[in-house]
Amino acid sequence: MENYEFFKREFEFRGKHARMAEELWILNDYEHTYFKRLIDLYVLAAVVGFRMNRKAEPDLSPFTPKSIFPEQMLKEKANLDFIMQMMLMLDDTESITDEERVKKAFRGASTKEEFDQMQEMFNSYVRGGVEELYERLIVRTPDADDDYYDEKTANIMELFERFACQN
Amino acid sequence: MRFKSLEMSNFMRYKGNNRIEFSCDDKKNVTIILGDNTAGKTTIAQAFRWCLYGALLTERGKKQEDYQLLNNDILAKMDANSRASVFIEIIAEDDRHVYQIRREVQYTRLYPKMIAKEFYKKVALYQSEKDDPDIKLEIQGDSEINELINELFPRNLSHYFLFDGERWSDATVDGVKENIKDSVHILTGLSAYQAAMKHLKDMGGNSVIRKFNDKIKGSGNIYDNLAEDRKQMERKIEKCEESVETAKINITHYETKCQEIENYLEENKNTEILQNKYKQCQVVRRTQEERKNSEYRALVQRFSEKAFMIFAEPMIEASLKMVKSVAGERRDIPHMHQASIDHIIKSGKCICGHSILPDSTEYQNLMEQRNYLPPADIGSLLGEFEHIGRNWKNTTSDTFDDMRESAQRVDDCLRAYEETCNQLSSIETQMNEQIDFKEKKNQLQHYRNEMKRHCNEKGELEGRIESYRKRIATIETDMRKQEAQSEENKKWRMRVEMAEQVYARMKKDFKEREREIFTELNQQIQNNFERMFNAKDKKIQLTEQYNIQMLYKTEIGGYREEKNLSEGEKIARNFAFIVTIMEYSRKKKAQKLMSDEIENDTLPIVLDGPFSKLGDENIRLIAKVLPEVSEQVIIFMLRKDWAYTGLDEYVGASYSIDKDADKSYASIRRTGGIL
């Protein structure tokens, strides 16, 4: 595991996901941005993508990529590792026993191949999550019976109600 | 004068034929037509105006051509070859005659567009004796018809007797001040004096006196030369009079312009207050903007830091459940690995101080603990995992409520901020309109100068006319000396003198009566204003030109004119005026029945939405006066306002305007004699 640690490298949103990220995260413009940092979008998108069981392939359309640098990744590594462990346990694409799942989650990747496969699973949930967040925060038009006058606030709270209430 | 009936065919929103019979009863002289808003009350008022004068009352910025007379439903059903006609027929009567006025326009359609094109139009007027209605005399020629209509219902006064309370606010139509004085003279009978005087002397070469004078023959060249001089003088007078008329028009024009700018400046004298308000608003907006941004920041931060934790809760629950099912009860020591035990054994001394010898109890215990540690056992990692999961849950226990509060604060701040922005933009608009103060003042000065110039010119012209007249008088004295001493001349001379005397007497009488009527009307209008509006601190009065001024009581006991009147005040002022005129002519008519005075008639009053801008008490006071001062009252009003009028006992006929919500046209239904 020492050699194959997750979340130590740079991550890039590419293609349509970069375009979506650009609308969801605007540096230092709190009136219009939905996230404080780009990494915050990355973390939340992973959870939302997994909860919606929504994965997405990388998109290759020409758009300037948006990068999360390694030092930012490292700052959030503990939380990301935790999410990765949950994903490895709960992702049911492989038909293995619960015990094997738990062991896999805690042992981590032992080969390069395994590392890449696990990281790609995580990132595909992130991309699916970005798409889901884009639809719910940017595309959605608030209803007349929303409690909030401001569209951005209404959409954030609607998302919140949706994902925090199903506990 | 009374309206007997009004018939409309396909006129504006009234499809097909609709007929209203007005009450002509002496006591129950009120006809009411009740309708809801936008039902078509004003259209009936427009029907009167169009039938009488061939023109509608236009709204500000609109032209006659902007209004379509033909009913839309009828137009929609027409094809390129069909024709449809619109007509209004009014039957009116005075004490002796019945008048039938009918105006009609035929239309074709510019198919397939929804545009009606005028094809043919006609106005007809039939007059018959009241006692012998079957023998109708048709008045020939459009100008003769219009002249007679104008005599019966003076157009200059139409804004008073066809009173539109909803739109009527000033005695100007299309920006031109109406000559109310002439119209008042018609109604009060004074116009007959003026006509007689004009006929006798005031129309120059065509007047009676002038024609009599022409009959007198002179002898010799001197007389002829003098006659020629007189003609020249008269021509000069005519020219001067034309110029005086032009000057008068110019003076009125500049007077109106000055009045407009003065009103504008008066209305905007609070610019300074506005500017202060603007500055205050800007400060408030800055603070609100900062607060709004800081609340947004708090919301985004909270969302970024906590949302993933709270959203991950179901995942935590599920994975913990799975971990527990796999690992059973944990026996691990947190954060310890097998390597840690190996390190202790290698050092030969336990952390408690005992030596670790091979096969000793210490060694065996440590080796047992080593089995429960990772990597051989994942137990301690599970403990860490559980710990993080619990930590996420604890950290987010209040997040939901915090987010809601934070979102509410963002919303409140944003609303407050936007409200201030709107206020600022409204103040900006008001201030922008006032930016050209200086230019306005310059304009005012220019108009005043122009007015003064035209007044001087008029004065000079009038002076010249006066001197020409004197010159004519001298010439005529000289001519008399040169007259031939014939019998014929003597006869004409006598006639001229008689006509001159009649003229002088009429002029004197006219002046006296004019003064008398003016004083009486002025007194009466004040009384009516008090009676109808319970006004204590203000009064109204007529100027010599019959403009109505409203005066406010000042603190020192005098009165000053107030030009900035509210809509309600303007209506009150005009009501007082029309009631006064009606009352006056009715009184004179009563007197005429006893003596043989110059004929004059009263007008009916047609009121469209007269009370919409007045309070309940004023409605009651005004309504009570109307049936007493006018021979006939016709009112279109909102159903809901009727109760305040207290007019039930005067109602001789009542109608209701029906308009279904799903239909685009309205119709009129008689609802009875008395409500």
Image: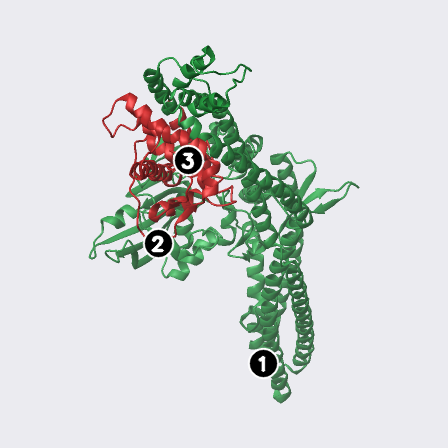
* Mark in front: 2 vs 1: 2
In the image, is residue A12 above or below residue B234?
Answer: above
Classify residue B209 as left or right of residue A139: right
Residue marked by disc 1 = B217
Task: Pick the quarter of the image with the C terminus of chain B.
Answer: top left
Foreground residue, B614 or B498? B614
Are the residues tagged 1 and 3 within 8 Å (C-beta)? no
How packed is label 3: few (under 14 Cα within 10 Å), some, or many (20 or more)? Answer: many
CA separation, marks 2 and 3? 98 Å
CA separation, marks 1 and 3? 122 Å
In the image, is residue B645 above or below residue B479?
Answer: above
Foreground residue, B449 or B630? B449
Q: Position of residue B427 (x, y in %)?
A: 60, 47
The chain under label 3 reads: A
* Amino acid type shown at disc 1: Lys
Q: Position of residue B519 (x, y in %)?
A: 67, 47
* Element under disc 1: loop
Q: Position of residue B503 (x, y in %)?
A: 62, 63
* Amino acid type shown at disc 3: Val
**Could you say which disc has been placed on residue A43 in the image?**
3
Residue marked by disc 2 = B137
